Amino acid sequence: MFLQPKQTKYKKIRKGKLSKLEFKSNTLKFGTIGLKSAESGTISARQIESARQAINRKIKRKGRIWIKIFPHLPITKKPTEVRMGKGKGPVAYWATKVKKGTVLFEMCGVSTNEAIKAFKTGGAKLPVKTIIFN
């Protein structure tokens, strides 16, 4: 099951602009090793789930993983070959904006080498460049 909010105040919102650097969520809070974004971008709920599954497979479900981002931004899309106008399209998927330096995943309870291998495979599933740090 993909991540998405249980309820929102408004069904559709504007995407807005993406700022460059993150200073609030750039340190580890729970785990001992983490995966951090090296560039800004948008990550969909499917991509987050895909990365989580890849990381879990590599560590064979030992240890603990924290997902530090949540897709709360509804991305709308109009069907193909539809004329201009007639309003905004229906919600296609949920996504989150990620700034450079944001911690995406944290992990503990696994050896450092295993965690690095797992984060490399998980980071390959994401559309932004990532850095592994501790």
Image (spheres, grey):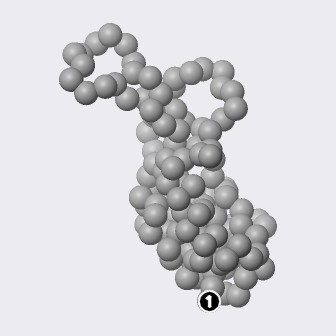
With 70 as the anchor, is 28 left or right in this view? right
Q: Position of residue 127 (x, y in %)?
A: 41, 58
- Please identify the quarter of the rendering in which residue 54 is found: bottom right
The relative height of residue 89 versus residue 58 in the rendered view (above or below) is above
Examine the rendering and report whether any part of residue 87 can be seen.
yes
- Please identify the quarter of the rendering in which residue 33 is found: bottom right
The relative height of residue 9 versus residue 99 in the rendered view (above or below) is above
Q: Measuring 71% from the left and 62% from the top, which residue is drawn there? A: 66
Q: Measuring 52% from the left and 42% from the top, which residue is drawn there? A: 95
Q: Measuring 34% from the left and 25% from the top, which residue is drawn there? A: 78
The relative height of residue 26 versus residue 10 in the rendered view (above or below) is below
Q: Position of residue 79 (x, y in %)?
A: 31, 25
Q: Position of residue 46 (x, y in %)?
A: 51, 50
Between 6 and 131, which is closer to the camera in this rendering? 6
Q: Measuring 37% from the left and 13% from the top, which residue is drawn there? A: 87
Q: At numbered mark 1, what does the secondary structure look like: helix, strand or loop?
A: helix
Between 8 and 17, which is closer to the camera in this rendering? 8
With 78 as the anchor, is 120 left or right in this view? right
* Mark 1: amino acid: Asn
Residue picked out by circle 1? 113
Examine the rendering and report whether any part of residue 99 can be seen.
no
With 45 as the anchor, is 70 left or right in this view? right
Q: Position of residue 32 (x, y in %)?
A: 74, 77
The relative height of residue 23 versus residue 31 in the rendered view (above or below) is above
User: For mark 1, does the 10 Å Cα neighbourhood hold few (<14), some (14 to 19), or many (20 or more) residues?
Assistant: few
Quadrant in which the C terminus appears = bottom right
Count of marks overlaid on the render: 1
